[in-house]
Image (tube, rainbow, N blue to C red):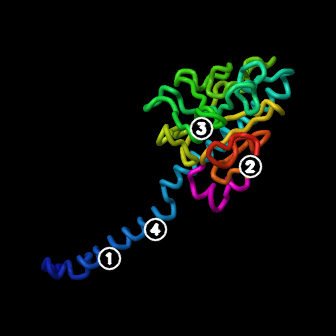
């Protein structure tokens, strides 16, 4: 039987490879699709949204814990002092308490126009990093949740996932930190946080839908006007 042998050029005649132009087109398509995926998913926005979701959850947890404390205690101490002296309208200096520890890089908050120090401007309350999460009244929120008959409803105080203040001498509403303040007159409290994602500040704007008076911060509590809407405006208005 006679066999027909093809030369290498004849044998490869029916096989077609990619040309350089075709490879460049494929690579270009992959690059475009990758860019679209990045724009759609936006990993930075995803991280911001995740942090905001934690902030919303944290403040809800604290509102529930403090609400339970208020309904369980006959003489609530919302700043862990008899008479709630550092709450708004207390006998001492009105104080906004921060989740930022006093031994964070840079030291204490020294702002004298919004959060600290002079005349009717509120003071800035801070505790050390070692104590900030404690629920026995020595944490950054000055409420002894361990005094409840059933024990503290939470094991530790939540802290902002970023928990930074850019300028300790000029704290503003863009700083990613939790705040707490109480009112001694009617035993109410307010907690707030800065939200940073587009998802929770635009399409689902929690800053304006929370019922508070400050559209720059997400507010929860039993009275959402304690901390006010501008520098030094933590007194009743």
- Residue under pointer 3: 115
The rendered magenta stretch, by its main secondary structure, is classed as helix
Q: Which mark lies nearer to you, 1 or 3? A: 3
First-in-chain label (4 vs 3): 4
In magenta segment, residue 97? no
Residue 138, horizontal then vertical, whole percent: 63, 20
Residue drawn 76% across the image and 17% down it: 147
Residue 46, horizontal then vertical, whole percent: 53, 53
First-in-chain label (2 vs 3): 3
Residue 198, horizontal then vertical, whole percent: 58, 58
- The residue at the far front in this view is 119
First-in-chain label (2 vs 1): 1
Residue drawn 62% across the image and 45% down it: 231
Q: CA distance from mark 2 to mark 3?
A: 19 Å
- Residue under pointer 1: 25
> How crowded is the residue under tag 1: few (<14 C-alpha within 10 Å), some, or many (20+)?
few
Residue drawn 19% across the image and 78% down it: 11
- Residue under pointer 2: 212
Q: Is residue 237 visible?
A: yes
Q: Seen in the image, is 193 located left or right of residue 44?
A: right
In this view, the residue in front, 124 or 200, is: 124
């Amino acid at each position: 039987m006679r066999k027909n042998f093809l030369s290498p050029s004849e044998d490869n005649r029916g096989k077609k490879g990619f040309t350089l132009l075709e490879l460049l087109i494929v690579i270009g398509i992959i690059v475009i699709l990758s860019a679209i995926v990045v724009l759609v998913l936006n990993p930075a926005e995803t991280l911001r949204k995740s942090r905001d979701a934690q902030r919303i959850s944290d403040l809800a947890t604290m509102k529930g814990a403090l609400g339970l404390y208020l309904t369980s205690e006959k003489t609530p101490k919302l700043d862990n002092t008899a008479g709630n002296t550092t709450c708004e309208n207390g006998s001492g200096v009105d104080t906004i308490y921060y989740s930022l520890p006093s031994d964070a890089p840079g030291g204490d908050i020294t702002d004298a126009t919004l959060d600290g120090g002079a005349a009717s401007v509120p003071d800035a309350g801070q505790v050390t990093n070692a104590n900030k999460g404690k629920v026995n009244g020595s944490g950054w929120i000055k409420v002894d949740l361990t005094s409840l008959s059933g024990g503290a409803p939470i094991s530790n105080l939540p802290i902002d996932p970023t928990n930074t203040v850019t300028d300790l001498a000029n704290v503003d509403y863009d700083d990613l930190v939790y705040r707490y303040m109480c009112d001694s007159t009617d035993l109410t409290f307010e907690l707030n946080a800065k939200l940073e994602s587009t998802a929770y500040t635009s399409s689902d704007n929690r800053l304006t839908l929370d019922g508070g008076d400050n559209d720059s911060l997400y507010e929860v509590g039993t009275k959402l006007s304690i901390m006010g809407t501008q520098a030094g405006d933590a007194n009743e208005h």
